[in-house]
Image (cartoon, rainbow, N blue to C red):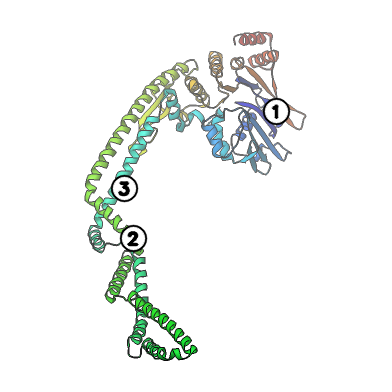
Amino acid sequence: MLATLSIRDLVIIEALDLDFAAGLGVLTGETGAGKSILLDALGLVLGARADSGLVRAGAEKSRVTAGFNVKLDSGPLAQLLDDNDLEIEAGEPLIIRRQVRADGGSRAHVNDQPVSAALLRELAPYLVEIHGQHDDRGLINPKGHLALLDSFAKADHGKVARVYRQWRDAETALAAALTEMEEAEKDREWLEHSLNELRSFGPQAGEEAALALERADMQKGERLSESLVEITDMLDGSNNPLAKLRSLTRKLDRIAPEHPILAEALSSLDRAIIEAGEGEDKLFEAAQALNFDPQQLEESETRLFAIRALARKHDVQPDDLADLLERLEARWGALESGGGNVVALTAARDKAKADYVGAADALHKQRVEAGTRLDKAVANELVPLKLDAARFQSSITILPEERWGPKGNSAAEFLISTNPGSDFAPLMKIASGGELSRFILALKVALAEQGGADTIIFDEIDRGVGGAVASAIGERLSRLSKDTQLLAVTHSPQVAAKGDHHLYISKSSDGTVARTNVVLLDIAARQEEIARMLSGAEVTNEARAQADRLLEGV
């Protein structure tokens, strides 16, 4: 709900601070006093284009600040604020500030956080509905008609949305299976050849690294074995140094008792023979361990080179050949069983589509029934508003399949016919300014329980009518304002008398500068203003008496 509006240096408004309350607020005043400027000011904070011509002559900039009391529950307004990182504490007002410079530049803030004018336009529908002579939003915008009708019908989109997702998921699964089968079919010959080749080869994960290590070990063994052969040949030949050493010790053993030093020498040589014997054993042991099989080396190298060649052929790493075999096996399996899988997926898709069509048709039927009720409700409001020759129609049509979605398979648009025998057409294309405002009022009354913006503004909805029609307009505005805040710019005393609050707009001048002033009227001032509206420039006692009767009828 609009709580406050503060204006500085806008057109002929130098400084103005207004407070607003719930219920029906009426704004009256003489022509040219500045009522439209208030709407221009409110339009700025709702994202209207910033025009340097709005800046008061001699001022550097204009500033407009509006405060709204909003319910920040889990609704779309709270989601929009959250999506744009606008933090507002519970109970805190939503304050929008717009500044327009004389050079045409502008800035906007929401609770002191800078925002774009585009974001203000996104916020606007949740804050204020403005219906006037040139309104191009709100109820006359066909984009919102389906949501309004569904709200009137109390329609639930949950089931339709759920089966729509299931249908689309089934479509996606079927399309993927068909694509996979088509691709596999195109590559059938290659796939079969590759599978046979890989199956016969039987690649194992990690095999390439193991073969490379085995080959390196065998190549190393080959080099060492050649050297050991030379060594062992020396140990086995007639010039075996160990055999000579043993012969030497046998000779020394015969003479060693003759002298202590010879005994020590014999002891040292005995130890050397033992050590040399152990070394000889290790050499023979090493020769056995390093003995390699040339055929095994050849087989390992052949397998290793084949793995690498096969990997290059299929453009994968050698260790990925086993995974490649699994993937090709899966493709072959899909190709072999693809027909049956596609049949099953097609059946699932058809069932999901049938479920969607059933749910969407039921929703469409609910919309048609609600449209009939809405048409009657609006028709009941048209006669008192002097639109008895007009007809209203909720047009609900089935959409082409490519436009079906989670909200169903139908579209809705509100149409009117203003004269007997004339065709139905969109609201904005047929109705004149005054007719359009009254059509909107009739529709708002019919949709009153469906909610919308917390603040509704009607700009001169009573233009061109008076008497009983103006009274009917006032009565409907008063009824509509019971559940929301409604502001009406009016020239009709019958409408003004229905207000819960009455703001009077006047213009004054010191001979050089004109200024707009706004005051909240008390009961006596209201009587005088309504009397002026009834009689014109000279307020008569008869006009005051009539004003009393209008006010008493509230």
Viewer-side residue, 215 vs 410 = 215
Residue 386 spot, x, y in % from top left: 49, 17
293 vs 81, left or right, is left
* Residue drawn at (70%, 39%) of the image: 61
Q: Which is closer to the viewer, label 3 or label 2?
A: 2
User: Disc 1 on helix, strand or loop?
Assistant: strand
**Which residue does the numbered mark 2 point to in the structure image?**
205
Residue 119 visible? The answer is: yes
User: Disc 2 on helix, strand or loop?
Assistant: loop
Q: Is residue 222 above or below residue 107?
A: below
Q: Quadrant of the N terminus?
A: top right
Mark 1 in CB contact with mark 2 (< 8 angstroms): no
User: Disc 3 on helix, strand or loop?
Assistant: helix
> In the rendered image, which quarter is residue 458 located in?
top right
Residue 312 spot, x, y in % from top left: 33, 67
**Which residue does the numbered mark 1 point to in the structure image?**
17
Q: Earlier in the sequence, mark 1 or mark 2?
A: 1
**Which residue does the numbered mark 3 point to in the structure image?**
176
Using a 10 Å C-alpha cutoff, classify the residue at mark 1 as few (fewer than 14 neighbours), some (14 to 19) or many (20 or more): some
Q: Which is closer to the viewer, label 1 or label 2?
A: 2
Q: CA distance from mark 1 to mark 2?
A: 80 Å
